Amino acid sequence: MNEHELATALLDASPDGLLLVDGDGVIVVANPSAAAIFGRSADELVGSPVEQLVPAERRDVHVNHRARYMRRPDSRAMGSGLRLFAEHADGTLFPVEISLSPMESDGEQFTIATVRDVTEREEALSDVALLKDRERIARDLHDMVIQRLFATGMSLQAVAGQAEPPIVADRVQATIDELDDTIRELRDTIFRLGQNEERSLSAQLIEIVHGRTQHLGFTPALDVVGSLSDVPDHVAEQLLATVTEGLSNVSRHAAATAAMVRVERTDEELRLSITDNGLGMSTSPKRRGGLTNMMWRAAELGGTCTIGAADPAGTQLSWHVPV
């Protein structure tokens, strides 16, 4: 392999975009990575002014920067300490890192520009910053707000039995109940803050449970035991559908004032139970509609679905599938 072939192979193999720019700012060489980064073919890049790759509003300024660099060329990062953007062929802007190196050939001055698309890295850094901010907010809510509400509720509980007349005692108890509800909602919020943007299965369960509040007249409790992060998608889909159907049945038929949704992941099984304190059900429930759907979902996954009386009152749905 001669020197020319070796240079060509190095250009083609580079994961970074490489541009060779002459003293007039015209691109004379562009490697395949540069073409991919800018959404243009190498032939389109060669012979065109390098300014076409700069955001339109910065092109005049870039001409001056390029001229100043050509007067005192050196190897350095372009725009050190600044966020730089380039323009794709479709007009969109994306963040880049650019390094410049001078090169002389046959008495003519050239510049080698190494271009790296850092979109994914910046998005990852942004995600990390967002997660850290969420963690801080969640920690402050738990360590400060919830603890203060809990202490206030305990203080009211201590005097609730001594309040006179009865209407005052009722009002104090109602306030205690509201504080308990607020604490529960804050804990749910903290849990949601810990989820990523891909909407984990736990986050989707919370969304469904809270979404039924308007229809039920209360917010069901949710208890998740074990990690749901590796539940297969096809099982998760059926679980979410069953929770939705089960809570719909509670709102339509139970006349309940409270309900509990419990999801437990074991090594071999995913278990769901929905328990309410409503009217209960007949000794021979009709196997049609929502109940049939839930049973079929379990059966298709090799599991079971049963419904019966809860203790001391109400109804309990039990849905178990292997994982």
Image (tube, rainbow, N blue to C red):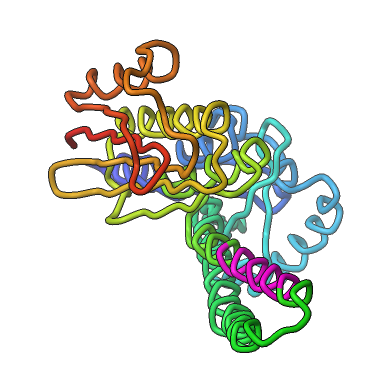
Comparing 207 with 83, the one in front is: 207
Residue at the image position 40 percent from the left and 10 percent from the top: 288
Comparing 149 with 6, the one in front is: 149
Quadrant where the N terminus is found in the figure: top left
Q: Position of residue 211 (x, y in %)?
A: 61, 40
Outermost residue on the top side: it is 288
Q: How many marks?
A: 0
Q: Can residue 22 be spotted in the picture?
A: yes
Q: Position of residue 138 (x, y in %)?
A: 55, 72
215 above or below 207? above
Outermost residue on the left side: it is 268
231 above or below 234? below
258 above or below 234? below
Q: Which range of residues does the magenta coloring cover? A: 170-184
Comparing 277 with 217, the one in front is: 277
Instruction: Give residue 6's quadrant in the image.
Output: top left
Residue 171 covered by magenta stretch: yes
Q: Position of residue 49 (x, y in %)?
A: 72, 41
Q: Position of residue 277 (x, y in %)?
A: 47, 44
Q: Can residue 103 be spotted in the picture?
A: no
Residue at the image position 52 percent from the left and 33 percent from the top: 254
Residue 23 covered by magenta stretch: no
Residue at the image position 44 percent from the left and 48 percent from the top: 260
Instruction: Give residue 78's quadrant in the image.
Output: bottom right
Give the overall secondary structure of the magenta segment.
helix
